[in-house]
Image: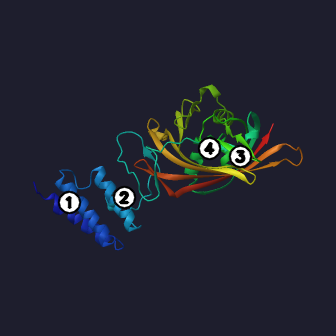
Amino acid sequence: QPSTTLPLALATATTVYHNKHTMTENRMMIIVSLLICSYYGGVDALSVSSRARRDALRNISAIGGGITSSAIFLPQASQAANPLPLQSSSGAPVRIEELGSGLDLLSPKPITSEVYYASSMTDTKWRVQRVVTSVEGNLEQSALAWKLLGGSDEKAFTSKLTEVYEADFIAAPEGTKDAAYTFEGKTLQSAILDRSLELSSRIGVDKGSIQLDTQNNSIEYTRNNNEGPVNLTVVSRKIEPPTESGFGSDEVYRILSSAGGIFAGTNVFRCARVRRRFRRGFDESTGKRILDGIEIVTTHRVMDGVAGIEMPTSTCKTRLRYTQL
C-alpha cells in the first residue's frame, strides 16, 4: 500500500537532479521510473531487480556517457570515491549481459582455437627473456596482474630486471580450429605453447601441481599455501596466424584469486587483457632462431561480473625474446 516511501524516494531523486546539473531529463526519468518500479514492487527504493537494472543501464548506455550505474544507486557521498577494481565471487551477483564495451566474464562464449606458432617450432625448447619496459596507470593493480599471470620475482617488475625461464612448444591437437595453415603451397599443422611447463619454469613450481583444463581454457596453480590457488581462464581470444611478417594474439583473462589482506579468505574476480605480437628472425651471433615479441597487459575494472574493456586501469608493456636451445 502507498506510504511515505515514494515521496521520500522522489525527493531523493530531485536532490540528485539538482546536484547533477549535467544530467539530462532522459536520465532523470530513468531514475524516477526505477524508484517507482521499486516502490510498487514491494522492495526498497534503492534496490531494484536485475532485469530493471539491466534495462536501465542499457538505456543509459544508449543515451550517452556522463552517468554510471554507481551514480544511480550509490549515495551522493560515495560518488567521489574511486571505484573498487575487484568483484566478489561469493553470493549471487546481478548480471549485465551487455553494457557498452563490457565483456561478460562469467558466461563467456566457447573458445575452440588456440594461440598458434609456426609449425617448425613443434617439439622444440626455447629460452625466454622478458623485461618490463613501462608501466602506466594504477601501479598496484598492474603489479598484481603481472604476478598473478605468472610473474616471478617482484624485483623483475619494480626494478625492470630481466626474467629468464624455459618454454616448450608442442603440436596443436588434430581438429583444433584453424590450426592448419598453408605455407609455400604446403599445409602445415601449427605449434602451440606448453602453458603448464612455461608457468612451472617461470614461478618455480612442479609442473604436475599445475591443473590445465583445455576444454575450459583455464589453468590453475598454487604458488604457496599462504597465497592460495590462482585460476586463469581465457574468456576471449583473437589470433593472427603465422605469416612471414609475424603473428600475434589478443586474450582476455578472468583471474580468480584471493582478495588478500584481511579478506584473504575471500576469492575475487579480476580481469587482464594480454596482447602479444611476434616476429621471427635469427640471432646474428649464434645463428639460432629467435622470436622477438612485444606484450601489452592491461587491467580492467570488474562490476557485476562484467569487465570494462574499453577503459583500462593500468598498462604494462614488456619486451620478450625467445631463443631456441
Q: Which mark is residue 178?
A: 4
Q: Residue at x 47, y 37 (%)?
A: 264
Mark pair 4, 1: CA separation: 52 Å
- The picture places residue 282, in percent across and down from the top left corner, at 83, 47
Q: From mark 3 to mark 4, how far is it between C-alphas?
A: 11 Å
- In the picture provided, is 77 more to the left or to the right than 219? left
- Looking at the figure, which quarter contains the C terminus? top right
Residue kind at label 3, given as amino acid type? Thr
Give the structural element (helix, strand or loop) at label 2.
Answer: helix
Residue for badge 3: 182
Which residue occupies the extreme top position in the image?
A: 208
x and y percentages locating residue 193 in the rendered image: 67, 38
Picture mark count: 4
Q: Give the class, few, some or many, for how many residues have Cα within 10 Å of label 3's Cα (few <14, many ≥20).
A: few
Type of residue at label 4?
Answer: Asp
Q: Read off the residue under disc 1.
A: 36
Q: Earlier in the sequence, mark 3 or mark 1?
A: 1
Picture quarter with the N terminus: bottom left
Q: Amino acid at mark 1?
A: Ile
Distance (Cα) linking label 2 and label 3:
48 Å
Q: Residue at x 20, y 60 (%)?
A: 36
**Quarter assignment of residue 117:** top right
Instruction: Give neighbour class at mark 4: few <14, some 14-19, many 20+ (Cα, 10 Å).
Output: some
Residue 220, labelled with which disc? none
The residue that disc 2 covers is 69
From the viewer's side, name the closer residue of 310 and 242.
242
Q: Earlier in the sequence, mark 4 or mark 1?
A: 1
Residue in front for this viewpoint, 168 or 116: 116
